[in-house]
Amino acid sequence: MLDISLIRATSILGHSALCYDKYYFERSIRKTRIESDLQGGIEQNQLEFYYQIQVDHDRKPISAEALVRWNHPELGLLSPLEFIPIAEQSLLIVELGNHLLEMAFKQLLEWGQCDSTKHLTLSVNVTAKQYGMPDFISTITALLKKYPIDASKLTLELTESIQVADVGCVTQKMHYLKDNYQIKLSLDDFGTGYSSLVYLKTMPFDEIKIDQSFIVNIATSHKDAGLVKAIVALSKSYHFEVLAEGVETKAQFDYLREIGCHSFQGYLFSKPLPIDAFQALLNQ
Ligand code: C2E
Ligand code: MG
Ligand code: MG
């Protein structure tokens, strides 16, 4: 005799296996599409920075982070969380990274020529793979020649969540950029990686950015509040500036101010905005 419940279970399992296959099939098609379109996207200027303000204790704008978006003609506005990891799997990240650096230099040059923006520092995300390229320093040097910016207004963020293959080599390059050009260095997503303390000890960062996953519960969890307080104290003893990422509420902002964070970034102040909206925000 047929076991009905077994038939039902098998058909449910079969259905979910099909859904699972379909999901992975569609994802892999999308990934291949992104991979093959990215080069053209760079050449056709489809990449755009959104700018997110960073403020001081008095909510005064002091800097901004450039966060890339890709206006894909068919797939729509793509998040960096989708295409950066794909680019990172190949050398495309180097070309993409160089293109984004050039966009940042152009923007800083413009800001430097205008009274209302010349005080702003601009932070750009740079991947460990970019740092690892033998011509990373000469790329920056060439950009500095092409765009005569005040290099002390440029901050390079390195995310801590990604393992740096050759810490010694990256550290050397960082020293070069700081000593010769006064470029600032920031450790992004602090606390999410494996090597936080090693990076702090060896790399010449000016700033650490406490990851938003630590900030999200500080107003409701003693444990998280205590942890963030300890991170701020640790950073201060190393003479780093501390920026809190993902500040969304006044309660979080008040606590972070009280424990001595230097600067703040998050939806409480503004979401990342296209350049025109960002300029309008500054003029408010
Ligand atoms: P990130 O550098 O840590 O940037 C912060 C991310 O947090 C941004 O996401 C920002 O939109 C988001 N965020 C800011 N404030 C808040 C908040 O209050 N609440 C919440 N929930 N989120 C907030 P986005 O723009 O999607 O960027 C994600 C990541 O993609 C960045 O993380 C960075 O690692 C990478 N990325 C972005 N632009 C670039 C780039 O130009 N080059 C490289 N290599 N990576 C980039
Ligand atoms: Mg960042
Ligand atoms: Mg971050």
Image (cartoon, helix red, strand yellow):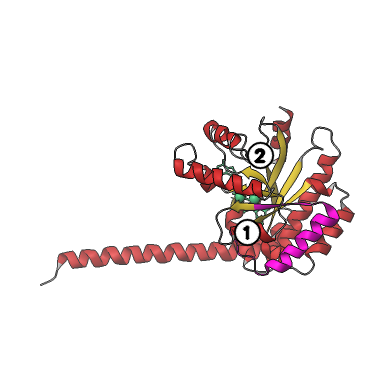
Q: Report the residue marked by disc 1.
A: 84
Residue situated in front as seen by the camera: 170 or 42:
170
Residue situated in front as seen by the camera: 73 or 35:
35
The image position of residue 129, as x and y in percent, is 68, 65
The image position of residue 196, as x and y in percent, is 59, 58
Residue situated in front as seen by the camera: 226 or 77:
226
Report if residue 265 is visible in the image. yes
Point out the tag, 1 or 2, that comes first from the N-terminus. Answer: 1
Label 1 CB-ligand 1 distance < 8 A: yes
The residue lying furthest to the left in this view is: 1
Q: Is residue 247 left or right of residue 117?
A: left
Q: Is residue 69 magenta?
A: no
Note whether 106 is above or below 268 in the view shown.
Answer: below
Q: Is residue 156 left or right of residue 252?
A: right
Note whether 235 is above or below 160 in the view shown.
Answer: above
Residue shown at the point (45%, 40%) measured from the top left = 222
The residue lying furthest to the bottom in this view is: 1
Q: Mark 1 packing: few (<14 Cα in 10 Å), some, or many (20+)?
A: some
- Report helix, strand or loop for mark 2: strand
Label 2 CB-ligand 1 distance < 8 A: no
The image position of residue 123, as x and y in percent, is 72, 48
Q: Report the residue marked by disc 2.
A: 263
Residue range (magenta): 161-187
